[in-house]
Image (cartoon, rainbow, N blue to C red):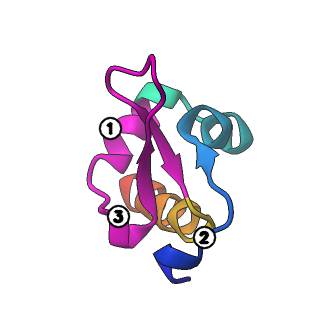
Amino acid sequence: MDVNKVDSVKTLALVARELGRDEEWLFDIAAEMEPEDGLIWVFGPDDDGGAMAFTPDGIECLINLIAEQS
């Protein structure tokens, strides 16, 4: 999926809940990812560090990284 044609993303918290994984552990795993892998940062007016979010391809990439860790 072309990153410029993404119409929705899921936050790290939502992906962690859907995968039944610890959010902090997933954050550490996802730290290896780049925007080309489907990882983006979402910022709002009160966000100091932003929220990690994933495109559908990013979720697939994250699942593959999880499999490599197991």
Query: Of the residues shown, which amino acid type is indicated by label 2?
Result: Val
Report the residue at 58% width, 78% height from top.
Answer: 5
**Gap between marks 2 and 1, in whole Å?**
24 Å
Label 1: few (<14), some or many (≥20) within 10 Å? few
Label 3: few (<14), some or many (≥20) within 10 Å? few
Picture layout, residue 3 above or below residue 40: below
Nearer to us of marks 2 and 3 is 2
The residue at which mark 2 appears reads as 6
Please give the range of residues in magenta. Answer: 25-54
Label 2: few (<14), some or many (≥20) within 10 Å? few
Picture layout, residue 60 above or below residue 25: below
Query: Of the residues shown, which amino acid type is indicated by label 3?
Result: Pro
- Horizontal side, residue 23 vs residue 35: left or right: right
- Horizontal side, residue 45 vs residue 6: left or right: left
Say which element carries label 1. helix
Of 68 and 63, which appears nearest the observer?
63
Say which element carries label 3. helix
**Gap between marks 1 and 3, in whole Å?**
16 Å
Of 8 and 59, which appears nearest the observer?
8
Report the residue at 63% width, 66% height from top.
Answer: 56
Q: Say whether residue 52 is magenta.
A: yes
Residue at the right extreme, as displayed: 18
- Mark linked to residue 28: 1
Nearer to us of marks 2 and 1 is 2
Q: Earlier in the sequence, mark 2 or mark 1?
A: 2
Residue at the front extreme, as displayed: 45
Q: Earlier in the sequence, mark 2 or mark 3?
A: 2
Residue at the top extreme, as displayed: 46
Q: Earlier in the sequence, mark 1 or mark 3?
A: 1
